[in-house]
Image (tube, rainbow, N blue to C red):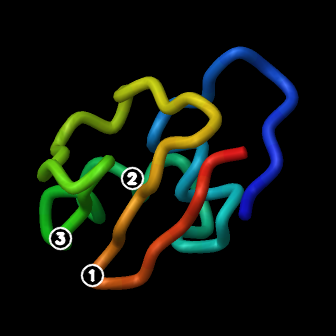
């Protein structure tokens, strides 16, 4: 689980925090070329707001927002 200390975190920031990508600049291309889901729904917006309790799945690997 990646800990956040704000009301929400954007998907690109979360992917960086979770160690999926190294820089925020990679997010757009990474999201476009990989299977990224939020709560079971395909997501292609790097600015998608994530809230505690959301589940992000990247190529079958699950991450919890908390």
Q: Nearer the viewer, mark 1 or mark 2?
A: 1
Q: As drawn, which residue projects farthest toward the front?
A: 53
- When the figure is inspected, residue 3 is found, relative to residue 23, above or below; the finding is above
Rounded to the nearest angstrom, the CA distance separating label 1 from label 2 is 14 Å
Q: Position of residue 13 (x, y in %)?
A: 59, 42
Mark closest to the chain's N terminus, 3 or 1:
3
Check disc 3 and report its element: helix, strand or loop.
loop
- The residue closer to the viewer here, 31 or 23, is 31
Q: Position of residue 35 (x, y in %)?
A: 17, 70
> Which quadrant of the view contains residue 56?
bottom left
- The residue closer to the viewer here, 3 or 21, is 3
Mark closest to the chain's N terminus, 1 or 2:
2
> Which quadrant of the view contains residue 46?
top left
> Which quadrant of the view contains residue 53?
top right
Mark closest to the chain's N terminus, 3 or 2:
2
Crowding at mark 2 (Cα within 10 Å: few <14, some 14-19, many 20+): many
- When the figure is inspected, residue 56 is found, relative to residue 46, above or below; the finding is below
As drawn, the label of residue 35 is 3
Check disc 1 and report its element: helix, strand or loop.
loop
Crowding at mark 1 (Cα within 10 Å: few <14, some 14-19, many 20+): few
* Residue occupied by mark 2: 27
Rounded to the nearest angstrom, the CA distance separating label 3 from label 1 is 5 Å
Q: Position of residue 26 (x, y in %)?
A: 42, 58
- Residue at 87% x, 29% y is 5
- The residue closer to the viewer here, 21 or 56, is 56
* Residue occupied by mark 1: 59
């Amino acid at each position: 689980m990646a800990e956040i200390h704000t009301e929400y975190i954007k998907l690109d920031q979360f992917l960086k925090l979770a160690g999926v990508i190294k820089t925020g600049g990679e997010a757009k291309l990474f999201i476009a070329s990989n299977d990224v889901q939020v709560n079971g729904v395909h997501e292609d917006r790097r600015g998608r707001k994530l809230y505690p309790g959301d589940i992000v799945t990247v190529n079958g690997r699950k991450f919890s927002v908390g």
